[in-house]
Image (tube, rainbow, N blue to C red):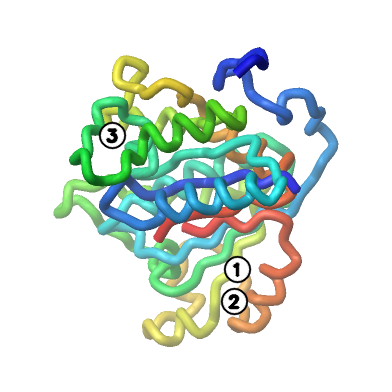
């Protein structure tokens, strides 16, 4: 099955991004596909390459990057939400790309399921 | 890894498929007050974009989300844009299915007459049934 995922909360503040990651990882391990993950609202902070968590904590941003690289996941950050919050090409982590909300709707159309993580 | 790595920007399986002609039932579920958090405003941005994809779009308003449709919003004092007129513009985008949960209205002392657009007021059970029929439910 193809799962598209939407992440609506920021890093560390909220469990949503961790849950989304665990879900994506588990789905892939079970043989499903995750073609696209869309980051919206404060979820755009998942794509900041300036993030520096303490060394004894999980690194949410690099964890996404690794998953995307290994499984060819298209990680899309909403441009309007990103601009509001100061996420731009210049501080965008690798393996993420900035694009429009159409990518979310498209993911909803093309995936078998769209799973939303947020408040 | 020996395999050729496509850039994340390349898009994956999605780009190979022709999405044209596929019409899915999209429901946007609005559960939060219009101000205080940005969820309602950014939800509306998604709704407007979805209109361009010729999908079967509906909106449901429940919990504090019913406040999004209340008439006479004045936001000057909190220096936030009053985006409530946009709900009236939805009709122009062919988005006409607006469902409001009856219980949420009642719990807040509101009636259909307090709302700024034409809606269909439905029981919680009927909204649940409607949700179960959707292909895509995005909850804000």
Apparent side of residue B83 relative to residue B92 in the rendered image (left or right): left
Residue A104 picture quarter: top right
Residue A78 in the image, given as x and y percentages of width and height:
45, 33
Q: Can residue B86 be seen in this view?
A: no
Q: Residue at x 24, y 27 (%)?
A: A50
In this rendering, the answer to whether B20 lies above or below A15 is above
Q: Which of marks 1 and 3 is in front?
A: 3
Q: Are marks 2 and 1 in contact (CB under 8 Å)?
A: yes
Q: Is residue B15 visible?
A: yes
Q: Do the residues labelled 1 and 3 touch (CB within 8 Å)?
A: no
Residue placed under numbered mark 3 in the picture:
A85
Residue B53 in the image, given as x and y percentages of width and height:
69, 36
Residue B7 in the image, given as x and y percentages of width and height:
57, 16
Q: Which mark is residue B113?
A: none
Q: Residue at x 44, y 41 (%)?
A: A40
Q: How crowded is the residue under tag 2: few (<14 C-alpha within 10 Å), some, or many (20+)?
A: some
Residue placed under numbered mark 1 in the picture:
B99
Q: What's the distance in space between the residues labelled 2 and 3, CA to CA?
A: 36 Å
Q: What's the distance in space between the residues labelled 2 and 1, CA to CA?
A: 6 Å
Q: Residue at x 26, y 52 (%)?
A: A13
Residue A87 picture quarter: top left
Residue B73 picture quarter: bottom left
> Which residue is most to the right?
B21
Residue placed under numbered mark 2 in the picture:
B121
């Amino acid at each position: 099955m193809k799962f598209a995922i939407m992440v609506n909360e920021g890093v560390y503040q909220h469990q949503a991004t961790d849950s989304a990651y665990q879900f994506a990882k588990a789905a892939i391990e079970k043989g499903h596909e995750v073609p696209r993950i869309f980051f919206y609202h404060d979820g755009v902070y998942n794509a900041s390459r300036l993030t520096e968590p303490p060394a004894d904590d999980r690194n949410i941003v690099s964890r996404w990057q690794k998953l995307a690289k290994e499984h060819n996941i298209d990680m899309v950050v909403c441009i309007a939400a990103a601009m509001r919050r100061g996420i731009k090409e210049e501080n965008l982590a690798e393996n993420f790309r900035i694009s429009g909300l159409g990518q979310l709707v498209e993911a909803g159309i093309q995936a078998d399921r769209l799973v939303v993580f947020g408040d | 890894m020996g395999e050729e790595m496509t850039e994340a920007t390349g898009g994956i399986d999605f780009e190979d498929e022709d999405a044209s002609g596929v019409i899915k039932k999209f429901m946007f579920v609005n559960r939060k007050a219009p101000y205080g958090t940005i969820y309602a405003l950014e939800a509306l941005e998604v709704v407007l974009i979805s209109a361009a994809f010729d999908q079967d779009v509906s909106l449901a308003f429940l919990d504090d989300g019913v406040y999004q449709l209340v008439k006479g919003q004045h936001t000057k004092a909190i220096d936030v844009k009053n985006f409530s007129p946009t709900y009236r513009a939805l009709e122009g985008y062919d988005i006409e299915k607006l469902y409001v949960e009856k219980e949420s209205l009642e719990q807040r002392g509101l009636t259909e007459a307090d709302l700024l657009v034409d809606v269909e007021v439905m029981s919680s059970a009927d909204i649940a049934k409607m949700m179960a029929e959707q292909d895509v439910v995005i909850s804000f």
